[in-house]
Amino acid sequence: MQFKIYGSFMKNNVQLITYVDRLTGSDISALNTLLHNQFSDLFSGVHLLPFYFPIDGSDAGFDPIDHTQVDSRLGQWQDVKLLGEAHELMADLIVNHMSAQSLEFKDVLKNGKKSPFWELFLTKGKVFPSGLTEQQQQQIYRPRPGSCFTAFDLPDNESAEFWTTFTSNQIDIDVNSIVGREYLSRILTIFAQNNIKMIRLDAAGYAIKKAGTSCFMIDETFDFIDELTKSANKLGMETLVEIHSYYQTQIEIAKRVDQVYDFALPPLILHSIFSSNFNALIQWLTISPKNCITVLDTHDGIGIIDIGPMDGKPGLLTEQQIDQLVETIHINSGGESKMATGTAASNVDLYQVNCTYYDALGQSDYGYLLARAIQFFSPGIPQVYYGGLLAETNDMTLLEQTNIGRDINRPYLNDAQLAQAIEKPFVKAMMALIKLRNSCSAFDGVFSVLGQGAEITLAWENEESQARLTINLLDKYSVIELTERGESTLIDLQELLA
């Protein structure tokens, strides 16, 4: 089947996903230097993971005390603006919640309903004024076990149950309130003033709550995202919706937003390599959204819900195939992923496997390069996580220190570690692959996918430019063929690692 690539405000080149301090060991200025030196010509854009105050809260910056303030340890807005002069920047708009340590919520705890910020936060009573029934509670879609409410004491011996979708330190915002809309609008304006070009709407699917619904990606949620997207577009920014959900739901969501993640791709590539069978991946690539960002790894885990069955409907993989996929990851990682996944390590999201993608593939340089090649040839704009770029292994020391499962794939690096990583044969091959993806105009053309079983061919054609990736897992054959104005070049992926 053939598809035309979807247009975007962003260049159709490889982007970097990174924490500022965890990659550089320093600040935004150091990241800018890195991008212009060791990483020159690699990334047209950068997704800056939360750089707001504080970067070291209970959820690595996704629980901002002040969403409009750059953490002073990283720099200031002027440094972000300067970084954005040469690279398209993506920033997280944490739509659903803010920190319980914020000045706004502390004022609510001090003054109760008299606080000017009372309407900024969502309570159970606002959504269920007559009380929450058992049936209504069962309808609510949950990303984690337990209640989605936390009780807080207020003045005059009163208390209130606030929505805390993720953790008790992340208080949900009432985005329908005037003060809630003003809060989000203020952040958008600051982003636009400082060269942010794309906004990742973090946890947007949970932003709207309505009694008698799942409170997740309901019709009113789409209306909210539409409105927020229009506001961003007027300021010269595009939005990326971060949703983990059933694959058919993802397809429908993609029709109504600027960009979505292709979260089904990472587990399907692993399944293909583990089973030597591309059939499920080929099926997905014939129906997957084309207005997407592709990833293999991110600051979160490897999603499973995106490929599984739901409510009696079949998934891209069966439950037995998913069980085998997860078990193979655990085996390949020597059991390290099991120590970081599910209830084993204080995880918020139980539908993800926490492990570096490199360890999920048993630290196989060849298998990992295959996976990256498939990602780069799949429809969408590719993003590469800093740990994945450098083929970092599971950080068991950090996991032991924090007991936060996702920290297994959130390493802190210093200059010496970075210099050593860049010399790895895999990293050199990866950089060559990135430059190939960036320089070939075929990827702005028409995509097609063919194959069956152990073989797959991903191809792009744009006027006189063609790019074709052919892989046979049984024969260990993996070749990229590039054609420009009738002249062809063959690149053997195994030789890239030599």
Image (cartoon, grey):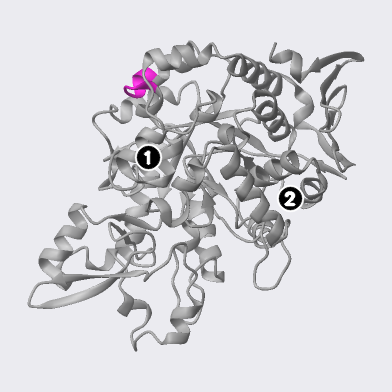
Which mark is first along the chain, 2 or 1?
2
Identified at 34% across, 40% down, the residue is 400
- Residue 470's x, y, as percent? 84, 29
- Residue 488's x, y, as percent? 88, 14
Q: Which image quadrant for residue 323?
A: bottom right
Q: In this view, does 65 lie above or below 397?
A: below
Q: Viewer-nearest of labels 1 and 2?
A: 1
Mark 1–mark 2 Cα distance, whole angstroms, equals 34 Å
Residue carrying label 2: 288
Residue 3 belongs to magenta span: no
Q: In this view, does 40 lie above or below 392?
A: above
Is residue 456 toward the left or the right of residue 80 in the image? right
Identified at 45% across, 12% down, the residue is 419
Q: Name the quarter where the C terminus is drawn.
A: top right
* Residue type indicated by callout 1: Leu
Asked whether residue 6 is in view, the answer is no
Identified at 36% across, 33% down, the residue is 397
Query: Which residues fall within the magenta stretch?
Result: 24-30
Q: Which mark is residue 144?
A: none
Asked whether residue 306 is in view, the answer is yes
Q: Which image quadrant for residue 22?
A: top left
- Residue 310's x, y, as percent? 65, 68
Return the residue found at the far left. Answer: 156
* Residue type indicated by callout 2: Ser
Looking at the rendered structure, the secondary structure element under dot 2 is loop
Is residue 26 toward the left or the right of residue 329 in the image? left
Residue carrying label 1: 399
Residue 27 belongs to magenta span: yes
Q: Nearer the viewer, residue 103 or 25?
A: 25
CB contact under 8 Å: marks 1 and 2: no
- Residue 125's x, y, as percent? 31, 79
Return the residue found at the far right. Answer: 486
